[in-house]
Amino acid sequence: MSRSKIGVVFDSSAYAPKPLEHTRVVELRVNKGDRSYKELTEIDWDEFYKDLREKKNIPTTSAAPIEEVRSAINELLDEGNDNVIGIWLSKHFSVTFEEAKMLESEFNGRFIALDTKLVAAGPYRMILEALKAIDLGWSLDEVVNHVIEVRDAYQTIFLASIEHLAKGGRIGKAQALAGNLLHFQPLLFVDDGMVNSYKVVRGRKAAIKEMPQFMIKNFGHEQLFLDIVWSDNFDEVSVLEQFLEENGMKRQDVLRLGPVIGTHLGPDLLALFGVPTKVML
């Protein structure tokens, strides 16, 4: 069966490590002072995290202009695609999905916007799955339903900066101070697109060791697609890999978290994304 005439547009927070055919990427923005920067092409990520760690020029973030989303959709349609699927980061992190959703009526059913309810490795895997289904000649509805099935099967756990969690209001300042003094590490998970507290563990390495256990708790010993995401702490990736191996697990990819989501979750971010292989193509 020949490839379906379906294009895919997605936002930069999927942090795809390489260009993908039949797609367009819409870049989210990091705002510093009175200037706005595209996170993939206009920011040095190492310098960004260095400044963030040193608390220099704490930025804000924003969605891409709606005109860029519209232009990306039109480009894919002009290339001969009958339809375009938009795969966007969780609406709880950005208005990107909601703004894209408003374009559906403008394209008279030729464009569909999907909320992945995740960021980074989750959306990245969903994009790859959509492209596989498109290459197999699946219909628009079949592709959309498959992406939703993958999305709803995901589990994510991560470690984030205590200071950034306090700034974002997820924990109180007193908790943050006590956590820093006692070396407590908050583990969080994503449920229906929202960040929730899982448990607090004393010591960074002990917290990382808990991450494979979270997957076992949710999936038992099912075979999983596992991806690791880091921000400015690549040395901890091997620590997590070791704990995965001890539990008979192996990761697929290692992706770096970019500046937009990094602004909100801070330095020292380490995340593990898991989905059963049985729902993947």
Image (cartoon, rainbow, N blue to C red):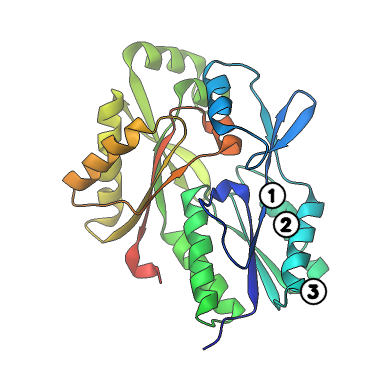
Q: Position of residue 84 (x, y in %)?
A: 68, 70
| N-terminal-most mark, 3 or 2 | 2
Q: Give the Cα separation between the discs numbered 3 and 1.
A: 20 Å
| N-terminal-most mark, 3 or 1 | 1
Image height of 82 relative to 8, above or below: below
Q: Are marks 3 and 2 in contact (CB under 8 Å)?
A: no
Q: Which SS class for mark 3?
A: loop
Q: Position of residue 244 (x, y in %)?
A: 24, 45
Query: Viewed as shown, does residue 43 lie left or right of 200?
Result: right
Which quadrant is the C terminus positioned in?
bottom left
Q: Position of residue 213 (x, y in %)?
A: 25, 44
Residue at the far bottom in the pictured view: 1
Give the amino acid at mark 2. Ala
Give the amino acid at mark 3. Asn
Question: Is any part of residue 215 visible from this angle?
Answer: yes
Which residue is disc 2 drawn over?
100
Q: In front: 72, or 178? A: 72
Mark 3 crowd level (few <14, some 14–19, many ≥20, 10 Å Cα): few
Q: Which SS class for mark 2?
A: helix
Q: Are marks 3 and 1 in contact (CB under 8 Å)?
A: no
Give the amino acid at mark 1. Thr
Q: Give the Cα separation between the discs numbered 3 and 2.
A: 14 Å
Image height of 50 relative to 191, above or below: above
Q: In front: 43, or 227? A: 43
Q: Which mark is residue 108?
A: 3
Query: Viewed as shown, does residue 100 lie left or right of 198?
Result: right
Which residue is disc 1 drawn over?
96
Q: Residue at x 77, y 72 (%)?
A: 78
Mark 2 crowd level (few <14, some 14–19, many ≥20, 10 Å Cα): many
Q: Are marks 1 and 2 in contact (CB under 8 Å)?
A: yes
